[in-house]
Image: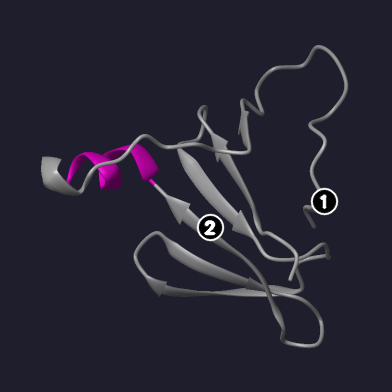
Amino acid sequence: MKKQKTIFDSENDIFWVIFKEGVEAYYEEYAPGFVVEFDKNSNPIGIEIRNWSRLIKSYPTSEKREDNYDDVVNFSEKEGSPPDYPYIFA
């Protein structure tokens, strides 16, 4: 099984868990700020969690851990090439 990829966009405070490469056809918001993204065949391709930093700070200290993201991305930065991850924003 292929490992999912995680990305944190620090500028917009969004955390993604990407299950597989694909174009997002639609999404469903299951709770405020908790979005599941689907491809055209209704297969989930990822999860988007908005306001990630605020959410993590709300957990009791005993449950916190050192976060180890695959990528930390600031999408507002213009220099260099785009980040290297298998997700296509539509």
In the image, what residue occupies the spot 77% across and 52% down? 89
- Answer yes or no: is residue 37 visible: yes
Specify whether 26 is left or right of 52.
Answer: right
In the image, what residue occupies the spot 82% across and 51% down? 86
Q: Which residues are magenta?
A: 51-59
Q: Main secondary structure of the magenta part?
A: helix
Which is nearer the eye, 83 or 11?
83
Which is nearer the eye, 65 or 39?
65
Image x and y of residue 11, in percent: 52, 27
Tell me the number on the disc at residue 68.
Answer: none
Circle 2 is placed at which residue position?
Answer: 48
Answer with the quarter of the image where residue 69 lies. top right
User: Mark 1 vs mark 2: which is more N-terminal?
Assistant: 2
In the image, what residue occupies the spot 13% across and 40% down? 61
Above or below, 15 against 32 in this view is: above
- Seen from this angle, which residue lies furthest top? 79
Circle 1 is placed at which residue position?
Answer: 86
Q: In front: mark 1 or mark 2?
A: 1
Image x and y of residue 68, in percent: 49, 36
Above or below, 9 against 74 in this view is: below
Q: How is the image coloured?
A: one colour
Residue 58 in magenta stretch:
yes
Spatial CA span between label 1 and label 2 = 15 Å
Which is nearer the eye, 7 or 35?
7
Above or below, 40 against 72 in this view is: below
Specify whether 84 is left or right of 72.
Answer: right
Residue 18 in magenta stretch:
no
- Answer yes or no: is residue 59 visible: no
Callout 2: helix, strand or loop?
strand
